[in-house]
Image: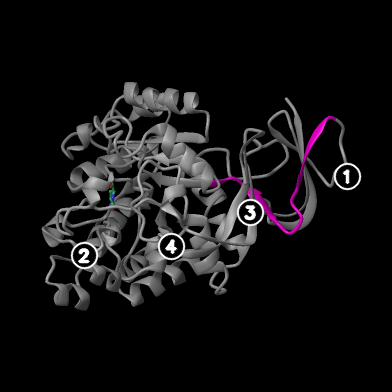
């Protein structure tokens, strides 16, 4: 396989606490050496003024395939991932059929391999058919390659089932990744319960619906010794609960999306369904809490919750349109523009939450540029300013609230397993 020498880039690899300008040699699909001045038979990438980092990893992606290919396919979703700088993603099991069998895990892995874009890992269902009644065949799913368990889209509602899921997954060292929502509190809810919701007269989704479920799950994780991964955290209350749980030594990790650290429920005044997702956009206090959680390490990962929905579905009235927005192609720009540029996080902190931390949650040997590691690399132009244009997206769907936004920072080269998959 050919060699690639990435020259003069600022290499930031939080897994090695590395941040320095150097040359990085890739050989035979692996990270081969640093500080190499030149090499024979080599492709050169000039990374002067750029950041060279481990390929980004998003552990919360809805690929919709199988079953809802009108929204996204494995080919288009993984192409969108590359366009956003991601070299690995983990896909969620709320497909049709849900990912609760070895056959479905294998289907996704084979299709992802055929697409040949980025690495795809599979999060399988906690419960059979995602019905919340009976535990899925966790052992068999792990054998097939599942890296985590979730019924996302909906919570694991039955506390007894959740307890068993913790106990079972503990045997395999895998996390239970829950969508935290008390459904009695959110029924008919469209947006965050607050002033804007009151004015608009839409159904409310109170922050307490998330906080109560996170409390329950923390208690069950503590009781069983299991590993709770809290998906798409959005409320200050749940961040507080997670922070305290971590201090007590409970095995809990958490993730936040760019939209939850960027937007508020005030956006819904436009009645644009691209501001409708679950959990919902909340008030500024919650946004600030998300940023504080990122800063102090309470929140481990930044994920997109990339949730494509075909245009005709999102074009329905706000209370009928489905929850969710896409995010793979805007995440990095939002991290740079909304977290790094204002000084909330430095590059190492931000990249840690986009590389090594998510790799650890799903238990894969990725997210590092250590010598010998798979050569999954992103070269980022931290200065480039660009306008979000959904017409240019690789995703099959365009349901983004960020159309027309001016963002700073973008992936300009994406290398997966030593092969250049994106170059702009
Ligand atoms: O907004 C959301 N969309 N939240 C979820 O939990 C599921 C997701 C989807 O699958 O569309």
Q: Nearer the viewer, mark 3 or mark 1?
A: 3
- Front one among 306 and 363: 306
Query: Magenta part mainly helix, strand or loop?
Result: strand
Residues under numbered marks 2 and 4 in contact, where contact means CB atoms less than 8 Å apart: no
Camera-near label (1 vs 4) is 4
Which colour scheme appears in the figure?
A: one colour
Question: Residue 285's spot in the image, x, y percent?
Answer: 35, 77
Query: Can residue 155 be seen in the rendering of this structure?
Result: no
Q: Residue at x 33, y 54 (%)?
A: 222
Query: Measured along the vertical axis of the image, is residue 388 above or below residue 91?
Result: below
Q: CA distance from mark 3 to mark 2?
A: 35 Å
Of marks 2 and 4, which one's residue comes earlier in the chain? 2
Query: What separation in Å lies between label 4 and label 3 (alpha carbons)?
Result: 21 Å
Find residue 383 and name its label: none
Q: Which residues are magenta?
A: 41-56
Quick check: is 263 in the magenta stretch?
Answer: no
Query: Quick one: label 1 or label 2, which is nearer the N terminus?
Result: 1
Q: Is mark 3 within 8 Å of ligand 1?
A: no
**Whether label 3 touches label 2, CB < 8 Å:** no
The Cα atoms of the two marked residues, 3 and 1, are separated by 21 Å
Evaluate if marks 4 and 3 touch, with contact meaning CB atoms under 8 Å apart: no
- Does dot 3 land on a helix, a strand or a loop? strand
Q: Along the line of sight, which residue is nearer the eye, 348 or 217?
A: 348
Name the residue carrying label 4: 404
User: Which residue bears the numbered disc 1?
Assistant: 37
Spatial separation of the CA atoms under disc 2 and disc 4: 23 Å
């Amino acid at each position: 396989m050919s060699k690639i020498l990435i020259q003069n880039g600022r290499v930031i690899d939080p897994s090695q606490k590395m941040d320095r300008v150097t040359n990085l040699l890739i050989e035979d699909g692996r990270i081969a050496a640093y500080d190499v001045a030149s090499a024979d038979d080599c492709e050169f990438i000039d990374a002067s003024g750029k950041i060279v980092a481990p390929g980004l990893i998003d552990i919360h992606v809805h690929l919709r395939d199988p079953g809802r290919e009108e929204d996204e396919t494995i080919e288009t979703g993984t192409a969108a991932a590359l366009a956003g700088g991601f070299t690995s993603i983990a896909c969620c099991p709320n497909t049709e059929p849900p990912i609760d069998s070895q056959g479905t895990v294998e289907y996704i892995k084979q299709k992802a391999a055929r697409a040949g874009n980025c690495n795809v890992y599979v999060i399988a269902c906690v419960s059979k058919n995602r019905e919340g009644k009976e535990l899925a065949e966790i052992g068999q799913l792990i054998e097939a390659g599942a890296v985590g368990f979730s019924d996302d889209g909906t919570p694991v509602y039955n506390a007894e089932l959740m307890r068993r899921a913790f106990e079972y997954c503990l045997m395999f060292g895998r996390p239970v990744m829950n969508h935290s929502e008390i459904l009695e509190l959110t029924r008919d809810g469209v947006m965050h319960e607050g002033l804007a919701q009151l004015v608009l007269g839409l159904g409310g989704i109170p922050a307490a619906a998330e906080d109560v479920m996170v409390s329950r799950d923390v208690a069950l994780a503590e009781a069983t010794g299991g590993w709770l991964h809290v998906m798409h955290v959005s409320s200050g209350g749940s961040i507080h609960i997670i922070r305290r749980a971590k201090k007590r030594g409970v095995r809990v990790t958490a993730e936040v999306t760019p939209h939850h650290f960027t937007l508020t429920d005030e956006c819904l005044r436009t009645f644009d369904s691209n501001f409708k997702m679950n959990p919902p956009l909340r008030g500024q206090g919650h946004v600030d809490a998300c940023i504080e959680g990122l800063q102090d390490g309470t929140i481990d990962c930044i994920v997109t919750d990339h949730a494509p929905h075909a245009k005709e579905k999102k074009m329905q009235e706000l209370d009928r349109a489905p929850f969710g927005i896409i995010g793979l192609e805007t995440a990095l720009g939002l991290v740079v523009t909304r977290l790094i540029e204002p000084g909330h996080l430095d590059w190492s902190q931000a990249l840690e939450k986009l590389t090594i931390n998510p790799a650890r949650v799903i238990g894969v040997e990725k997210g590092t540029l250590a010598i010998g590691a798979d050569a999954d690399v992103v070269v980022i132009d931290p200065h480039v300013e660009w306008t979000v244009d959904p017409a240019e997206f690789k995703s099959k769907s365009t349901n983004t609230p960020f159309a027309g936004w001016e963002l700073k920072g973008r992936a300009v080269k994406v290398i997966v397993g030593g092969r250049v998959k994106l170059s702009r």
